[in-house]
Amino acid sequence: MVKRTRKEAARLDEAARAGWLYYCAGNTQDEIATKLGVSRPTAQRLVSAAVSEGLVKVRLDHPIARCMELGKAICETYGIANCDVVPTDPAAPEAMFGMAQAAANYLERALQSPEPKIIALGTGRAMRAMVDETGRIDAQHHKIVSLVGTIAHDGAASFYDAVTDLADRTRAPHYPLPIPVIVADPQRRQRMQQQPPMDNILRLAREADIRFIGVGHLGDDAPLLIDGFISQDELTSLRNSGGIGEVISWSFDQDGNILDHPVNHCVTSAPALQPATNTIAVAKGAKKVAAIRGAMRGKLISTLITDEATAESLLR
């Protein structure tokens, strides 16, 4: 088997997507260009490449075909704009590699835009993995903004903060949010958010052109609990109030409604927009299925990047 470079593999994946959209889903080249975020001539070249590379026969001869069928079904079922599904590696079901590459493609497209953009990021393992897969791009005309506080209660920097790493790769000015994720009371949150420079950073976050976030669950090993942001009693209370997941630390129920709960009253993150536009969630895993489903139902995300096993669970 010929080993391909990351760039060659990404090109082949794009050709496979274009081939599936054209030959299987019946999209025009203009529609393909819009969905893939490329020009019409590029879409035409990708469709041609799908043929020349031998991907298109009677059916699309590429493992991504099944993934695209799942993605289309999720969009139709949950009413989101886009869903990218990557194959699940049976030998490493928890690996982030394929999803990180898919998310990095979205991020690189945004970074390569000639128009200045505000690009906002949440935190977590998925965000770090995405940035690790992003190439070095001179993008000084953009702004990189954090959607979530970047320090813990004791002042320690968040291990999963990806904003600084992305800024290092792009030379873009970056705006980390230098406050704890959750504070002791709503009054303290209000005082913190109204002080400069936090007020400016939160304004930029609200005005972001594109957002990248993870989706957290509220199970026994919920990230908010493991990372020390909430107590066991608070986690239990959130669950008793119907909480099943969180995005950028905002807890929500099975229908994606942000909970009216004391914990949420103390969250310092940028608002969770409903309905979300250009909000890309990178998430997978059996523990997160209910949370991902709720986030889509509540229109907390507009695009989902997940893996095949999770997609199948979401459609059951």
Image (cartoon, rainbow, N blue to C red):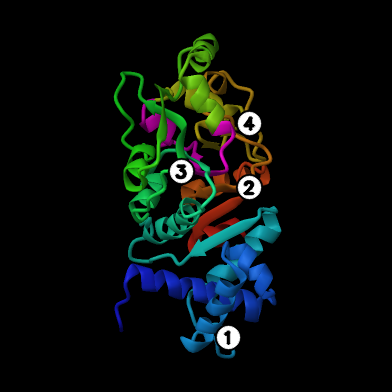
SS at badge 2: helix
Is 45 rendered above or below residue 223? below
Residue range corresponding to the magenta coloring:
205-228
Amino acid at pointer 2: Met
Q: Could you tell me residue 248's position as x and y percent?
A: 50, 35
Marks 4 and 1, how far apart at CA: 43 Å
Q: Residues within 10 Å of mark 4 (few under 14, many from 20)?
A: many
Residue position marked by numbered label 2 in the rendering: 296
> Mark 2 or mark 3, which has the lower sequence index?
3
Locate the C terminus and report the quarter of the image it occupies.
bottom right
Marks 1 and 3, how far apart at CA: 43 Å
Residue position marked by numbered label 4 in the rendering: 258
Marks 4 and 2, how far apart at CA: 13 Å
Mark 1 vs 2: CB contact within 8 A: no
> Mark 4 or mark 3, which has the lower sequence index?
3
SS at badge 4: loop
Q: Could you tell me residue 151's position as x and y percent?
A: 36, 25
Q: Nearer the viewer, mark 1 or mark 3?
A: 3
Mark 2 vs 3: CB contact within 8 A: no
Could one spot residue 267 in this view of the protein?
no
Residue position marked by numbered label 1 in the rendering: 59
SS at badge 1: loop
Amino acid at pointer 4: Ile
Residue position marked by numbered label 3 in the rendering: 141
> Mark 4 or mark 1, which has the lower sequence index?
1
Check residue 197 in the rendering and tell me which mark sits there, or answer none: none
SS at badge 3: loop
